[in-house]
Amino acid sequence: MKRISHQSRSQQTNNPATDSAALDTQLSLGKKEQLLFDDLKLAVGERVKLESVSQRGRYTVRYLGAYPGRCLMVSAPVHNGVMVSLKEGSAVRLRLIALNRACAFSCRVLKVISSPVSMLLLEHPGEIETVRVRKSPRVTSQLIISVDEAESGQFGSGWPRQALCGDISLQGARIEAGDQLGEVGDRLYVTSRVQVGTVEQVMMIEAVIRNLEEIEDSFSGGFRMVHGVEFTGLDEEGLLILTGFVYQQMLQEQVGL
């Protein structure tokens, strides 16, 4: 999970393929609900995932506004510093999170504008399909993670340390380690590789220890420390990846994978 930088915020370094997979995972679960796009009250500047159906490309763009019932405006997609060429009339699919809902809809490019600002005018979707993102579904993960102290010298030496993430939610995790990683209230950085769909991502999330428990280790006969941690400071990119992973684990548990 990422040290709250996740990846560069530029369009060139965001990972829209991973973000799209995360949103697709959420949309495949839960009860679907139809909402009017205008009711989402999407803020200007919010990141939106745009997929070109014809070019099979996925990009991160910015929402620039809407003419209610007529059209949407988003920044033009960019790849390697160059504006992506999309034809007027071509089909695109947009994915986003708003009002604690994962949303997706398809529309067509009405107009490509290159000056004074590069942007796309898109068909207004009217109603869109949404799925409410639950606050804290908790799933078994069994992830091998690396834990580092947030402040040097905060709790002993030998950092980073390996640990096991036994379960995880959108709000926190249960971390088991051979020794104590800190006191209640201490901050940590939790790093792991997770796979959402077919895309592997390295993430780092800042966490705060909220509770501690000593348990017996049935394998060694000794004891292990269980740390209940709360995730803090998650940005939109990190939340998308974490949500996609959690919901993917939920789906696997439901179908017995």
Image: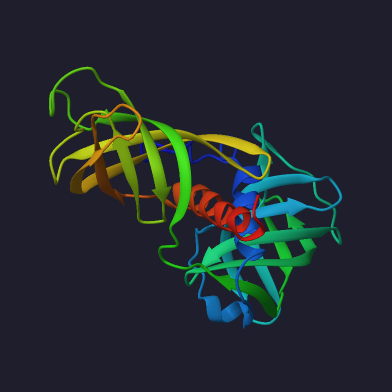
Residue 243 falls left or right of residue 22 = left
In this rendered view, identify the residue nearer to me: 59 or 32.
32
Position of residue 139 measured from the top left corner of the image (x, y, whole percent): 47, 54
Task: Decide: is 33 above or below 148.
Answer: below
Tell me which residue sits at (66%, 58%) in the image: 255
The answer to whether residue 38 is seen in the rendering is yes
Residue 209: % across, % down: 21, 45
Relative side of 250 to 165, left or right: right
In depth, the one of 87 and 250 nearer the eye is 250
Residue 61, can we see it?
A: no
How many marks can you see? 0
Residue found 66% across the figure and 69% down from its top: 72
Residue occupying the far top of the picture: 158
Tell which of 176 and 98 is nearer to you: 176
In this image, 136 relative to 180: left or right? Answer: right
Report which quarter residue 27 is drawn in: bottom right
Residue 83 sits in quarter: top right
Q: Position of residue 65 (x, y in %)?
A: 57, 68
In this picture, is 249 found above or below 219?
below
Q: Position of residue 55 (x, y in %)?
A: 84, 45
Q: Which residue sits at x=47%, y=69%?
A: 100
